[in-house]
């Protein structure tokens, strides 16, 4: 708020540059030409390949989310950065799966009652599936 003024006013001391993308192939949008050789070299060659890759990603994502659901309340062994191994009871993951909430975290320095583990610090984790999750591998090993 500027002193002596009525209500909220903003003053920009230094203008901020705006970067604009070049005009798109249709002339009115801003973006990249999907038919350019550069884009074609980076992308998949055909629609069928794209659909297959999307299907595979969907299946893997669903399996990963199901493994997180199966971990709730289970003891989990985490291998952390610098190859430190810790044990904890898994509680939950945040919506972006960037942090795991755990309880009774057993570290080399002692036990923490509640903790958050940052997923970028986790190399792998293992846990035993409970009997209600039959028909699936008995031990899952996932990277974060």
Image (cartoon, grey):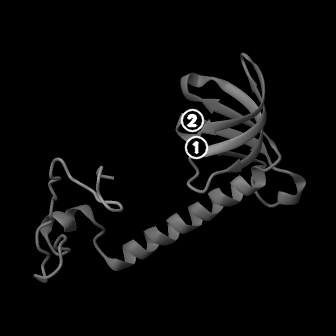
Circle 1 Cα neighbour tier, 10 Å, few/some/many (<14 / 14–19 / ≥20): few
Residue beneath the point at 15% across and 52% down: 15
Residue 21 tag number: none
Q: Residue 77 location, x and y as percent?
A: 73, 34
Q: What is the quadrant of residue 32 in the picture?
A: bottom left
Q: CA distance from mark 2 to mark 1?
A: 6 Å
Between 84 and 10, the one nearer to me in the picture: 10
Between 5 and 81, the one nearer to me in the picture: 5
Taking the image as shown, residue 43 lies to the left or right of residue 60, namely: left
Q: Which residue is label 1 attached to?
A: 143
Q: Residue 36 location, x and y as percent?
A: 13, 71
Query: What secondary structure is marked by label 2?
Result: strand
Of labels 2 and 1, earlier in sequence is 2
Between 64 and 29, the one nearer to me in the picture: 29
Taking the image as shown, residue 94 lies to the left or right of residue 105, namely: left
Taking the image as shown, residue 117 lies to the left or right of residue 16, namely: right
Residue beneath the point at 36% across and 62% down: 7
- The residue at the far right in this view is 131
Circle 2 Cα neighbour tier, 10 Å, few/some/many (<14 / 14–19 / ≥20): some
Residue beneath the point at 72% across and 17% down: 108
Between 116 and 107, the one nearer to me in the picture: 116
Q: Are marks 2 and 1 in contact (CB under 8 Å)?
A: yes
Q: Residue 82 location, x and y as percent?
A: 55, 22
Q: Is residue 80 above or below residue 63?
A: above
Q: Residue 111 location, x and y as percent?
A: 79, 24
Query: What secondary structure is marked by label 1?
Result: loop
Q: Is residue 18 above or below residue 72?
A: below
Q: Which residue is label 2 attached to?
A: 123
Taking the image as shown, residue 5 lies to the left or right of residue 92, namely: left
Q: Quadrant of the C terminus?
A: top right
């Amino acid at each position: 708020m500027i002193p002596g003024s009525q209500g909220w006013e903003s003053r920009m001391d230094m203008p901020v540059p705006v970067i604009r993308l070049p005009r798109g192939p249709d002339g009115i949008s801003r973006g990249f030409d999907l038919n350019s050789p550069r884009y074609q070299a980076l992308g998949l060659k055909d629609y069928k390949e794209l659909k297959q890759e999307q299907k595979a990603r969907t299946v893997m994502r669903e399996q990963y989310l199901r493994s997180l659901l199966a971990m709730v309340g289970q003891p989990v062994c985490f291998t952390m950065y610098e190859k430190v191994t810790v044990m904890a009871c898994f509680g939950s993951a945040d919506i972006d799966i960037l942090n795991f909430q755990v309880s009774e975290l057993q570290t080399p320095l002692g036990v923490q009652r509640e903790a958050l583990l940052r997923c970028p610090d986790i190399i792998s984790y293992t846990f035993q599936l409970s009997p209600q999750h039959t028909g699936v591998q008995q031990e899952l090993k996932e990277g974060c």
